[in-house]
Image (cartoon, rainbow, N blue to C red):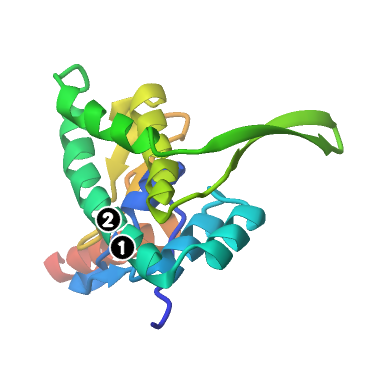
Amino acid sequence: MSEVEALFLGGHPALDFLNTKYGPEGQVREVIGDGESFLRWLARAELLDSRAIAQATRELSDRSLDVAAAEARKLRDWAVEWITRWRTRPKGDYGVELRRLNGLLERAHSYREAIATKDGVRVVAREHLLAADELLAVVGLQLAELVADEDPQLIKRCAGADCTLWFLDRTKAHRRLFCSTAACGNRAKVAAFRERQRQS
């Protein structure tokens, strides 16, 4: 399967996960097409280290990874719908959604490891993957941390025409409108300029 470019513009791994399906100019692109591309995305998102990726590649079947990727796509579509609601009503009753997230988190088999760094020693989380569906726990943790730790008003969708990308607005004034000033922001400026030219 040909690789679809993964975009890391969200400012948070959960939003980068939502952005694994995007539609520039009306053409939908799917980053998580199969199990192999799901593992590749988890590695690029730095949600699994090289040791966990190697273990998954070695010990988990292609079929089980493909099933996990299909489940990840369903999880993403569900999360898009939930995050859309949560942004406007953060204090709503989300018991059903939290139960689903907790069901994912229960799948994880993780441990902590002390590692040496140039600044001393730090403790990092490591995943020990016993089954492919545990990959969803890795993503579920990011979604849980997003709704637990982030301001819902700063979670935005790009204002660019036909852009479907999400991002966390970490700018000082919180006035960010576009996923990328170089892409959607520039296109919007060009469109506004052309409209002014047309009206004059």
Q: Secondary structure at mark 2?
A: helix
> Which of the two residues, 6 or 123, is positioned nearer the viewer here?
123
Q: Quadrant of the N terminus?
A: bottom left
Q: Quadrant of the C terminus?
A: bottom left
Q: Is residue 25 above or below residue 74?
A: below
Q: Are marks 1 and 2 in contact (CB under 8 Å)?
A: yes
Question: Percent x, y for residue 155?
Answer: 32, 36
Q: Is residue 122 above or below residue 61?
A: above
Q: Which residue type carries mark 1?
A: Val
- The image quadrant that residue 102 belongs to is top left
Q: Residue furthest bottom?
A: 2
- The image quadrant that residue 120 belongs to is top right
Q: Which mark is residue 71?
A: 2
From the viewer's perspective, is 50 left or right of 38? right
From the viewer's perspective, is 158 left or right of 82? right
State the residue position of label 1.
Answer: 67
Q: Secondary structure at mark 1?
A: helix
Q: Residue at x 40, y 83 (%)?
A: 2
| Residue 174 visible from this viewpoint | no
Q: Which residue type carries mark 2?
A: Glu
